Structures are given as C-alpha cells and as structure tokens.
Amino acid sequence: MSNVLNKHRAKYLEGKTANYIPALAQVNPSLAGVAIATIDGDVVGAGDSRVPFSIQSVSKIFGLVMAMNRLGDDLWQRVHMEPSGQAFNSIIQLEWEKGIPRNPVINAGALLVADVLVSHYSASKLAVLNYVRRLADDESVFIDNAVFESELKHGSRNAALTYLMKSFDNIEASVPEVLDHYFTQCAITMSCEQLAKSMLFLANKGKNPCTGERVCSKKDAHRINAILSTSGMYDQSGEFAFSVGLPAKSGVGGAIVAIVPNYGVICAWSPPLNGFGNSVVGKHIIADLAEELGLSIY
Amino acid sequence: MSNVLNKHRAKYLEGKTANYIPALAQVNPSLAGVAIATIDGDVVGAGDSRVPFSIQSVSKIFGLVMAMNRLGDDLWQRVHMEPSGQAFNSIIQLEWEKGIPRNPVINAGALLVADVLVSHYSASKLAVLNYVRRLADDESVFIDNAVFESELKHGSRNAALTYLMKSFDNIEASVPEVLDHYFTQCAITMSCEQLAKSMLFLANKGKNPCTGERVCSKKDAHRINAILSTSGMYDQSGEFAFSVGLPAKSGVGGAIVAIVPNYGVICAWSPPLNGFGNSVVGKHIIADLAEELGLSIY
Amino acid sequence: MSNVLNKHRAKYLEGKTANYIPALAQVNPSLAGVAIATIDGDVVGAGDSRVPFSIQSVSKIFGLVMAMNRLGDDLWQRVHMEPSGQAFNSIIQLEWEKGIPRNPVINAGALLVADVLVSHYSASKLAVLNYVRRLADDESVFIDNAVFESELKHGSRNAALTYLMKSFDNIEASVPEVLDHYFTQCAITMSCEQLAKSMLFLANKGKNPCTGERVCSKKDAHRINAILSTSGMYDQSGEFAFSVGLPAKSGVGGAIVAIVPNYGVICAWSPPLNGFGNSVVGKHIIADLAEELGLSIY
Amino acid sequence: MSNVLNKHRAKYLEGKTANYIPALAQVNPSLAGVAIATIDGDVVGAGDSRVPFSIQSVSKIFGLVMAMNRLGDDLWQRVHMEPSGQAFNSIIQLEWEKGIPRNPVINAGALLVADVLVSHYSASKLAVLNYVRRLADDESVFIDNAVFESELKHGSRNAALTYLMKSFDNIEASVPEVLDHYFTQCAITMSCEQLAKSMLFLANKGKNPCTGERVCSKKDAHRINAILSTSGMYDQSGEFAFSVGLPAKSGVGGAIVAIVPNYGVICAWSPPLNGFGNSVVGKHIIADLAEELGLSIY
C-alpha cells in the first residue's frame, strides 16, 4: 500500500486544491493517505492515513442512509437514481426535471436529503454527527466550524439549487435551515482510517461487521452501491467504473472512498483535484489497488 | 424460470411495441421468452426462448467489441464512457460535447462505432454477421432485410446524429455508408438462447467458455460491463442498477440481455416497451431472477 | 376605442388569471380597460381604464430607466440586451451565460437591475415609487402590500435566480434586500390611464411631454424601445413584433403597454393571460388599435 | 458616405473572414463598400459598392418572400417567428421545439423555407435566381458555382439540421434536394448596389418603388421587417436593435442589409466577421449612417 502511495504521491502537482472556500484552500496539498478496512475487522493505513480532513461530499452517503431509513421508498418520489450527465452542481437538469434531482449524490440531491433530515429529526445536525461517530466507532469525529462558516458564506449556488427545488414544492423546511444542515454535514472532519471503517456496512450487506449492528437493509446497501457506481464520482463516474470498477464517492476535500462488496472499503486522500472535482492522487491509488487486488465488480 | 415468466407475462399489456418502423410494429406483442446460458455450458430456456427477433440496440455490444479490438484505446478519443442523462437518441448532448458521443451504447456512440467498422473492414456488414454467428456458434443467425429497409427509410434522426458528428470531423466514412452498416447491425435476428450464449464472454473475463477462444481482453470485458452498468438501459440505467444490479443492454425489439460476471448471461424478450424504451416484461423477469438467485454485483 | 374593447372583451374567458399568488388570483377576471395618452397631452380611456391594478413586470421599465441613468453604460457589463428565446423565468440561460442575464426585462435581468438600485439608492423602494408618481403626475400611485407579501412568500424561483447570479458575483447587495426591492416594485398599483401617461417619455425621445422634463437621453429612449421590441412580451415577443409591430411590455397582472414613437402610449388591461403570460384581451385590443391607426414601426 | 466608409475601413483587421469554406476564405479581406438605395429611385455608393460578393444568408429574405407568397399563413405552422437566443446554426433549440425552427432567418428556418420552395416550384433554384434578378432589375446577378460546390461539400451541419426536421415530419422533399436549393441560394452573388436596390420593397410597404410592382402585401413587408428586427443579425440582433435601431440581415459573406422604412435600404459589405458572424466594418458603417441620418425606428 505504501508503495502505491509513494508511486503516485508526486502527482498532486497535477491537480488543484479546491479554492472556492478559504478553509479548504489552506490545506497542505502534499498530504496524502490511504487506508483499507476489511469486513474481517482489519484496518491498515499508509501515509497520512490518520490526518483528519474535510470529508465534504462523502458525507452525502451518511445523510442518504439516514434518509432512506427514515422515509423508506417514499424518498424516491422526491429524488431519482439516474446518473446526471452534468456537472455536480448543475442547475439546468434540475429545471428540466421540475425540481426532482437526478440522484442523491449530486448537490441538488444531497440538499433534498438534507431537507428530509431537517424535517424528520428535531436536531438533525447533531443526529448526523452522532450517526457518523457510531459508524466510525470514534467519538473524535468532529465538525470543523471554520469550514462550515466558510461554506455558508460562499453558498450562493447551493442556495439557488435549494430555492429552485422549493419553487417546485420539493423542499419542506426553510431554505436557510436546509443549507445550515447541509454545510454542517459537509464540514465533518475525519481521517482515511475513520472513513474507511465507517463505510464497512456497504461492503457487508448493510451490517456493521464490527458491532454486528444492522445499519440498513441488504437491499439498501446494494442500492447505495449501485448509485455510487453510476453517479458517485461526479461527471467522471462512467470513466471510474470503466477503469476501476468499484462503487465510490469523492469529495472536494480530496477524499475518495471505494466500496469493495464482501471485502472492505478503501479510502484514499490527497487534496488537489482534477477538472471533475476528484482527487488526482486518490484516483490513481485506488485504481492501482483495485487492479492489483483484482477487485473490479464487473 | 417458467414460473417467473408466467408471473409477468400478462404485463406486456402495460407496454407499447416500438412503432417507429412498420417491421417492428407487426411483431406479436404477447410473445415472451427467457434463457439463461452459464459459463459452464448450460443453456436453459422458457417460453418463446427460441423464437428469433430483431436484436436492435443489443447489437451495439457486438459492434463495440469489434471496434475495441481493432482500434485499441484510440477508440476512447472519439467516444466517451459517461452515462448521458438524456434520451438514447438525444442530439443535444452531442452538440454540447462537440460531436463526441457520451458513450458507445447510445445511438450517437453506436453510429461512431459503425464508422470505425466501416473504415476498418472491407466488408463490415458481413464481418459483424460472421462475428455474431461465431459467438452464438450458430449459422442460422441472419439479417432481416425488411427491418433493415424499414429502418433506413425512417432513419432521419440517426442521419442527423451522424451528420452532426461529421460536422465536428468525428466521422471518417460517408454518412450513407455508416447508416447502412448501422441499420444492418440493428436488423440482426436472434433468439433469447442465441443471444445469451453469444454474450457469455462478458461473464467469463473475455473468453468464450464454449470454445475457450479469447474474444477480448479481461480488462475490456470489465470495461464493457462497466459501460453497460452505467448506460446500457437508456435513461433508466440508474434505476436498473438500483433495483436489479446487473450490467445489461436492451433493444427496442424487446430484448434485455443481463451479464452476471463469473456465472452467465440472462436474456429475456417481450416486444412491448415502457416509456424508456425497455421491455416491460423483460425487465420484470430479469429483476426477479436476479433477486431470486442473488445475482446483484453490488 | 370602446368598440375595440367591446369586440374583444368576452375573450377574457380564453385566458387564465395569474394564480401563483393569491392576491393576483382574486382579481375580477372580467374587468378590462384601455387608455391612450398622446405626446400632445391627450389621455382618453375606455372601460375600466381608471381601475388600479398590479403592474407587475411593467415596472421593469421604471427600474431600468433609473438604473440606466445611475450607472450609464456600465450597466451593460452586467446585463445584456439580447432576446432570450426562453420562458421569462428560465434559469437555464442564466447558467449558460455565467450569471449575466440576457436582457433587463426578463426576471433575472430585472433582479439585476433591482440590485443596482438597492446598491445606489439609500431608500430604493421609496425612490422608485416617487419616480413613478412623478412620471404619472399622480400621487395616488401606491404599493399594494398584500401583493408584495404574497409575492415574497412565493418568491422561491426569483430567489433561485438571484442566488445563481450572486454565485457568479453579479449581485452586490444581499439577496433578501434585492428581492424585497423587486417585489415592492412589482406591487406598484396603477390604472391604464396612469400607466399610459407615465410612459410617454419613451414615445417622446426621452422627454416627458407634459412637464418638458428630460427623463432619459434620446438615445436611451430608443434603446429601451429596442429592448421592448425584441424582448418585452416574454417568449411571444417575436410574434408580437410580427403581428402588431410596436415596442411593448406586459405584466402578469394583465397589463400591456405599447409605445408608439412620436405619437403616444397605449395601455390595455385585462387579467386573464395566455400561455406566454400575456393578457389575452389586452393583446387583441392593442393589435386592433395598431392596425386601425396604422401604427406599426416596421 | 465615403467618410463613414473611410473612418471604419481599417477595422476589417479586427474581424475574421469566414473560413469554413475555401471559396469564402479567399476573398480579399480589405475590400469594403456601401450603398444606399432610396424609394425615390436614387442609388449612391462608396468604396467597392459595385464589387459582387457571395450574399449568403441575406438570400434568406428572398426565399422567405417567395415562400410567404406561395404558402400564405400556412407557412407559420411550420416555422415560428421568435428570436432564438442561440447561435445561428444551433441544433439544440430545434430538438426542444420538435423540429419547428424558431424563425425563418436562422439556418434551420431557411432550410425549411428551402423545402417549401423545392416542393412548390418545378425549378426552384432557377425561380429564386430570376426572382432576385427582377428585384435588382439586373440580369448580371449570378450563382457562384465554386461557392455552391464548396458549401455542399462542407454542409454536414446543415444536413444534420434538415434531417432532424425531417425526423419530425417537417420536411417534405428529400434532404439532398433541400440542401441543393439552399446552397444555391446562398451562392447568389451581388454587389452592395444591387442588394440595396433589390430590397427596396421592404422599405416601401411591399411595393417595388422602381416598377410599382407589388412584391408582397404591406402586412407581409411589416412582418419581414419585424422578423429582421428581432432575429436578422444572428445572436447579436438585440444589440443591433439597441445600438442601431433598424431591421437588418447579415450574411457570412460580409454583407449587412438594413431596411429604413419609408426611406430606403443601406447595404454595407466587408468580409471579416466578428464573433457573432456579422461584418465588423459593415456594422460600424450602418450604425454611423443610422445615427447621422436619424434613422432609428424606435
């Protein structure tokens, strides 16, 4: 694992750290880590695998599981599960499809999910944090307030997406509340090891392999993996399926989490992003590990 | 398998047989068949599993394998591998993306592939037919001339797509030649059993399990399955991954072929289509079989 | 004029009163009025020509003149003057053109103008009201608070447009302030006679013919008439130019104001709208008067 | 007039001669001419006002008049009269609006008009040429065969537009015939003086002022001027109305023809184009003349 990390580490120079908010732009671009957690309970890491970072869009998975558990299949009346064929923050398709987001892992869809959580939990922000801490089995997971404030301040596009959905009556709570929840969720801060561990239920048919606790139904674990396969890597999802072959989710903080069904979870992290918003180094690391270990699901 | 077929058979009334060409509109809508071919060499069928039908867009897979083998990775300079988020015959995205089709299994992409074949084979139409016959190990596979003529006559939209690509210098041959090849390929006529058998290499890491012959590299078999997973079911691909969990390709003739890696291929057929252009009964059959046999790849 | 009014009056049944806010939906749909004000100082009316109504988008002209006077040609760096080819409240083109509205008389453009006014006047809402009162030479012009409140409550789409522009750094003030100004302006309440009179400067090379006061430069009067000709009637602007041939602006309150250069202004009003958001009866009245009096500018 | 021409002549360096076909790219970019024909019968020119050039899209007006005369108002079932808000050769809007072109002076609309002519004249190409010769009162007007051949060879995008309309059943003739007519029409070759003269009927309520012959009804002359005002200058039409204020049509050959109702016609020509496809020098010349002579219609 170290060798793969070292092989690709220098490629961080080919990417650009997300700069739309100051809090993300300040992260040291040369940091890089990778961790594998298996359903047998092993967690191994290399590089900066214990350095916490902003998980950003990876948090969409946590919100989604919670909303699926709360709303059941009614959720799919309000958000679809088709790949978008558009940039992650596109407003065009949302207009075409009358306020129904294409899937829950583009921004519009995750904002819709945030609306579900705000409307169904008395303290949705705390609920998500606690949920993640339990999944990671680690109370040190925290919300980075500087990141949160920074995103809120630069959140005009997400506000536009949410107001547009509201104009189609697809948002129940007030828009500021939805944005407040959403940016809080994005500001969750975790390390590669924590993230890999917290997602193991997706590799294990919905059950947390450490505690034996059921996080979601087997069917829903399959469904989330399916959504990640077609849509988890923004508008590079097809290429990622094509060249790597694993369900995965990336975040503009530089993380990529890939699920290996019946085996475990790989999390790679390096802040600089390619033009699609995916970590340059992270993608290389996961591609190599997937090939080396023969992990493609296809 | 018969019980699954019988359970869903009557649902053909919920769909509409493709009527844009007379030759397809005339098919008896109540016909329905299903076949499973396994990499161990078994082929079992139920219902009208030996009745030949027009395979239409399922043929895109055959063309794609041939083009990948001929052109290697250069192919991906001329066609991408992202899901489209648009109808299968949309011209809008082709304009946005300057004549590069989103993937090889929407019409624009398959027309691009047809251009590759026309340009690299002296007799590309015959070459495809022979290729399919060898894969199916069956010389009775044929091209339905009435379907071909009918499509050519109603082929204005496909002509528009091809001319638009040509205007971006992404078509090498003459447009009429490309269309001639494309419609010939679409008019290939096969049964469920033949189709299932002919696709076994995709479930078997690129090797034809019957003959041991390598059809494509292991990597390319993975890649094709990845493309089918994100894009094979038109604009219902996400939903199909979500609810079924198998790489699959459908055709407006009413066929759906689903690949089960390391196991085999399921082909279901019933002419009436849903609003996305996918066989109503076929989708139900494959969904039930996949669930019953626990085949989801996710 | 009465005969033209009476000829078309019953056609209000073919339209639908704007119902997106309760305050507009309650207006009696059978009301109808028309007034002509000439640059010679005559004002003649027929029907309900003195009944006040919500002028809605007609107010975009007042805001535009004020912003042009304040900002000069710098305004055209932030909003273009091209017809949109899209619905009046479309967000798609705003995304394509990176937050620069196509013209100042679609919603996005008028919200941009509102931002200019909010940023350049200490009390922009009062300023607009006073401006209009002076143009109409009538202190009874007022802002309907029920309409204002109602619009604010149902203003999600306009909020989405404004936040999207802000995300492209094309909004200076806070979004709630901009919306507050915009909805206030829309809620200005006037009669046909008042509206016709207040727009005379556009028919008179920029000068108020009653007071002799210069409202805007001759050049800017031409420019506003040009914008109204290509874009004033929403996505029916081309058809209106084609069949009527006058610069005009409509509002969802049911008003249409048409400028006749060097002659005067016609204002017709009847609440029920056609599918483009233009008053059914109002359009018929103005078309007939324009033909009868030979007023087409083309 | 010479002074205006000389003032702007050197600006041809700011533009780029159309280079999509060799025949146009070869024209000397420093040529420039201007002519005014008045309804009183005067024709005055300056610079290269008698040098013939390819009139290209200006020919759309001739085709349109002929089709309006033949089909009457039925024409407007097959083509609309709204500005497009898109580039002149966009295929996107044609798809959205199901094969009905936005207006008759974008490419799709002119191709539709060509289909009307092909279907209603036994020798439509000759008919157009004779029509133009009569309007210009000059038998020397001719079709440049090299331009025609060149366009046909590079006509893939226009073929795509036509096939797309045909797929919506909005083209009656065969596509190659339509293209043949269209490119012939585009290849008509005239000078500024000839063009100005041939359009006088539009400034004269539909009557040819020289012969007294009625070319079209007064209403149709108004309508064509209205279409030119909202759509004649491609996606710069709004700006042209805003800054010049005259109905006008440009062609990629470098011509701009502007109609001055009840006065005459101005034709300016200089090959290099701006980013919208309009002659750089031509636009400056017409803007200056319109301002100097106070010709704005608004």
Image: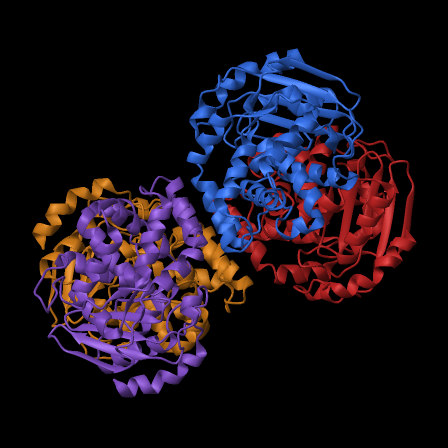
Chain colours: A orange, B purple, C red, D blue
Whole-percent x, y for residue C76 in the image: 59, 34
Q: Is residue D126 left or right of residue B217?
A: right
Locate the C terminus of chain A and report the quarter of the image it occupies.
bottom left
Question: Residue at point 40% right, 40% down?
Answer: B167
Whole-percent x, y for residue B241 in the image: 30, 69
Whole-percent x, y for residue B109 in the image: 33, 52
Locate the N terminus of chain A and report the quarter of the image it occupies.
bottom left
Please say whether residue B179 is visible from this viewpoint.
yes
Note whether D21 is above or below D110 in the view shown: above
Question: Residue at point 73% right, 28% down?
Answer: D200
Q: Is residue C129 left or right of residue B63?
A: right
Question: Residue at point 66% right, 27% down?
Answer: D133
The residue nearer to you, when weighing B182 against B292, is B182
Residue C27 image-quadrant placement: bottom right
The residue nearer to you, when weighing D297 against D138, is D138
Please say whether residue D285 is visible from this viewpoint.
no
Q: In this view, does C171 lie to the left or right of C249?
A: left
The residue nearer to you, when weighing D220 against A247, is D220
Whole-percent x, y for residue B149 in the image: 39, 59
The residue nearer to you, when weighing C217 against B106, is B106
